[in-house]
Amino acid sequence: KQIFRPHPNECSGSDLDGDTYFVCWDPELIPYKQIDAMDYSPAPTTKLDHEVTIENLTKLFSIAVDFPKTSVPAEIPQDLRVKEFSDFMEKPDKPSYQSHNVIGKLFREVKNLAPNECSIKFLTREKMQRFYDPDMEVEGFEDYIDDAFFYKSKYDYKLGNLMDYYRVKTEVEIPSGGIMKMSRSFTKKL
């Protein structure tokens, strides 16, 4: 029997299986008819009166997976949050430690073998001046130039890592999820 489901319900799932989507605010792509959102009234949260154990974490994971359906967030206590990351995770802005597991050893063995080139060219002051449009200036913009340069450089670094990892050629493929040609290593059948 065919059961009617509203489109928002059809588009969502709680299995976190890697569904991709793209958000675009082009007025021509916004539907002429708006449908009211479904009522996702949150269920009451559970407050724990005891220390969290590994068994309790499975409950938190279950709550996290069900979040799209229930709107109940999994609240992980501060003392259980990760404080340091393994070096192979390459998080330069976070505290890290040298992993002694197999993946850590492999990472350190091969990290200098790969070409140390980024897929995108980093932003430089010369590039900024070449594409600079004085008509876009707003009063007080000078106060934000250093911050903008810092965050753009950080964006370029992280984007470059993603592009190298997935071996994509253009910047637009990463935020849109529309990867034109996936690397063979990601399309192999296991």
Image: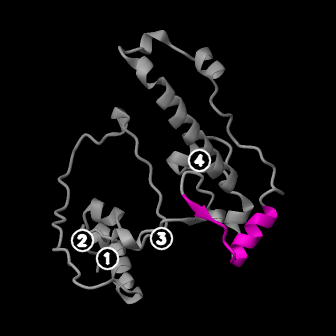
In which image quadrant can residue 44 be found? bottom left
Going from the N terminus, do you reach mark 4 or mark 1 first? 1
Looking at the image, is 143 positioned above or below residue 190? above
Residue assigned mark 3: 17
User: Looking at the image, is mark 2 or mark 3 nearer the viewer?
Assistant: 2
The amino acid at mark 3 is Asp
Instruction: Tell me the crowding category of disc 4: few under 14, some 14 to 19, or many 20 or more residues within 10 angstroms, Cα based.
Output: some
Magenta span: 95-110
Residue assigned mark 1: 63
Q: CA distance from mark 1 to mark 3?
A: 16 Å
Q: CA distance from mark 4 to mark 3?
A: 23 Å
Asked whether 147 or 8 is in front, the reply is 147
Residue assigned mark 4: 158
Q: Residue at horizontal 70%, vertical 42%?
A: 119
Residue assigned mark 2: 70
The amino acid at mark 4 is Lys
User: Looking at the image, is mark 2 or mark 1 nearer the viewer?
Assistant: 1
Q: Residue at horizontal 50%, vertical 27%?
A: 146
Q: CA distance from mark 2 to mark 3?
A: 18 Å
Going from the N terminus, do you reach mark 4 or mark 2 first? 2
The amino acid at mark 1 is Ile
